[in-house]
Image (cartoon, helix red, strand yellow):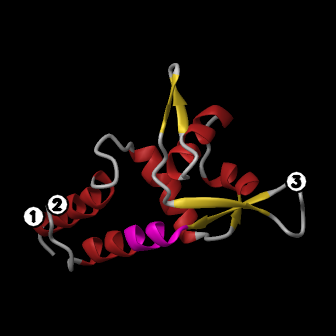
């Protein structure tokens, strides 16, 4: 694969997320991809794979869920790509799952990386 093809695939994959939020950050995408690859992961375990402070983690998680996050004095709507659900085995824990919308975004991302989605 040529460097130009790699660049086009990367941009197509990045644009899958930019269509959701044109200001999305690489860290938010990274957290989404970790959850997509470990669907059902305990949110407490995400800290090992996403080594940022609790406040950074919470902000990115809030952006990916439907609950949103606080930016300055206002609340910003979340993307509803993931949902967190209480763990039935441990009431203190929560697990992160892709929503149907998140599953579709992840599928489009994979297609773009594979070269089958060229909307750049």
Residue 113: x %, y % from top left: 28, 71
Decide which of 100, 52 is in the foreground and name it.
Answer: 100
What number of labels is visible? 3
Q: Which mark is nearer the camera, 2 or 3?
A: 3
Secondary structure under tag 3 reads loop
Which image quadrant for residue 117? bottom left
Residue 106: x %, y % from top left: 41, 70
Which circle's residue, 1 or 3, is located before the other in the chain?
A: 1
Q: Name the residue at 17% across, 60% down.
A: 7
Residue receiving disc 3: 92
CA–CA distance in space, label 2 to label 3:
43 Å
Q: Name the residue at 51% across, 51% down.
A: 64
Graded by Cα atoms within 10 Å as few (under 14), some (14 to 19) or many (20 or more), the crowding at tag 3 reads few
Side (left or right) of 100 relative to 40: left
Residue receiving disc 1: 4
Which image quadrant for residue 34? bottom right
Which residues are the magenta region? Answer: 99-106
From the image, give the main secondary structure of the stretch colored magenta.
helix
In the image, residue 65 sits, relative to residue 13, either above or below, namely above
Residue receiving disc 2: 7
Mark 1 and mark 2 in contact (Cβ < 8 Å)?
yes
């Amino acid at each position: 694969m040529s460097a130009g093809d790699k660049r086009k695939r990367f941009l197509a994959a990045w644009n899958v997320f930019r269509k959701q939020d044109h200001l999305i950050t690489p860290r938010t995408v990274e957290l989404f991809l970790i959850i997509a690859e470990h669907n059902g992961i305990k949110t407490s375990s995400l800290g090992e794979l996403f080594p940022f402070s609790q406040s950074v983690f919470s902000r990115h998680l809030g952006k990916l869920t439907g609950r949103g996050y606080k930016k300055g004095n206002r609340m910003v709507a979340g993307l509803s790509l993931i949902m967190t659900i209480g763990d039935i085995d441990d009431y203190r824990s929560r697990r992160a799952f892709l929503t149907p919308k998140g599953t579709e975004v992840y599928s489009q991302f994979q297609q773009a990386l594979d070269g089958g989605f060229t909307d750049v």
